[in-house]
Image (spheres, helix red, strand yellow):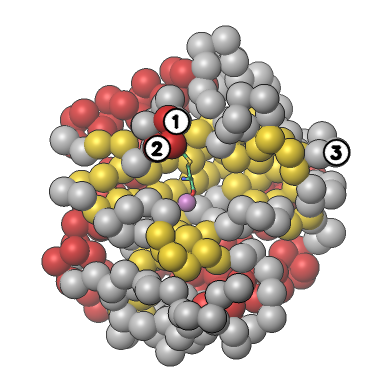
Amino acid sequence: MRNLPERIELKTPDQIALMRAAGLVVARALAAMRAAAAPGVSTADLDAIARDVLREAGATSSFLGYHGYPAVICASVNDRVVHGIPSAGEKLADGDLISIDFGAIVDGWHGDSAISVPVGAVAPDVAAMSAACEASMWDGLAAARSGARLSDISHAIESSVRRAGPYGIVPNYGGHGIGSEMHMAPHILNYGRAGKGPRLTPGMALAIEPMLTLGQRATRELDDGWTVVTADGSWAAHWEHTVAILDDGPWVLTAADGGRSELAKRGVTLSAAAVAA
Ligand code: MF3
Ligand code: CO
């Protein structure tokens, strides 16, 4: 039973600026890994790229050592949904879809983001599912505005997916508050009715992360204690961004352009804080 509202950490502008610095490290690393993902490249090779970016930036990993997690990225290929552990033996092949999740810490403040990347030519239904997942993330980010309620984000994601196709929306995993830790209150479902939960207020930061499948929504965890796979073997996609909620609009801290272009398509203007940075 939960009768008391959860405390949601509120950030000062200076703290959000540090989260932006972390977010830009994450954006740079994901761009480098996206460019490197090709047939024959191993998921451990991608992890090494991310480690190099962290070292050059003087940043540290959100993931390494988190409940004993052994790498700086999660690499989840095909029917793997999230939390795949990179390995030198796992080489990408033409037609794969790899979801890469990465988090960085700058001066104690976290950024967390994920992308799904086609390796060579992927099947059209796989590409469409990943595009639907990315679009639903942006629809959720566009709903992350001061004065809205938390489940408005969940509802925006679900509505977006339902418009796109008969995809499975993975339960039991979802978005989260983020800031001085990677995973903080509140938990954010990727589906649900609008108008529920805490009111979104300036200074909150949230990671929005839909996970879709081409089949059923059920998942299971492998014996490694981390890797989450679809129960039916269908392929999955995962997209994630960290967003700050400011009084005059959102700022997508892990997007190189702060989210400007994708939010504009949805009629949402970025916070002036982002424009000034
Ligand atoms: N970044 C993931 C998330 O989006 C969590 C990664 S779990 C870890 O919430 F163990 F790899 F850190
Ligand atoms: Co996350």
> From the viewer's perspective, is residue 69 above or below residue 11?
above
Mark 1, Cα crowd under 10 Å, few <14 / some 14-19 / many 20+, is some
Q: Name the image quarter holding the C terminus.
A: bottom left
- Horizontally, residue 24 falls left or right of residue 194, namely left
Cα gap from disc 3 to disc 1, whole angstroms: 26 Å
Type of amino acid at the residue the image marks with label 1: Tyr
Q: Are marks 3 and 2 in contact (CB under 8 Å)?
A: no
Are the residues tagged 2 and 1 within 8 Å (C-beta)? yes
Q: Position of residue 215 (x, y in %)?
A: 84, 47
Q: Can you tell which quarter of the image residue 69 is in?
A: top left
Label 2 Cα neighbours within 10 Å, binned few <14 / some 14-19 / many ≥20: few
**Which residue is located at x 36 percent, y 25 percent?**
49
Query: Marks 3 and 1: which is nearer the front?
Result: 1
Q: Quadrant of residue 124?
A: top right
Q: Residue at x 21, y 28 (%)?
A: 55
Identify the residue at image location x=44%, y=74%: 6
- The quadrant of the picture occupied by the N terminus is bottom right
Q: Is residue 67 left or right of residue 125?
A: left
Q: Which residue is mark 2?
A: 66
Residue that mark 1 sits on: 69
Q: Secondary structure at mark 3?
A: loop
**In the rendered view, would you say 55 is above or below 2?**
above
Left or right: where 67 falls relative to 220: left
Instruction: Indicate the position of residue 105 as horizontal and vertical percent values.
Output: 26, 45
The three-letter code of the residue at mark 2 reads Tyr
Which residue matches tag 3?
Answer: 232
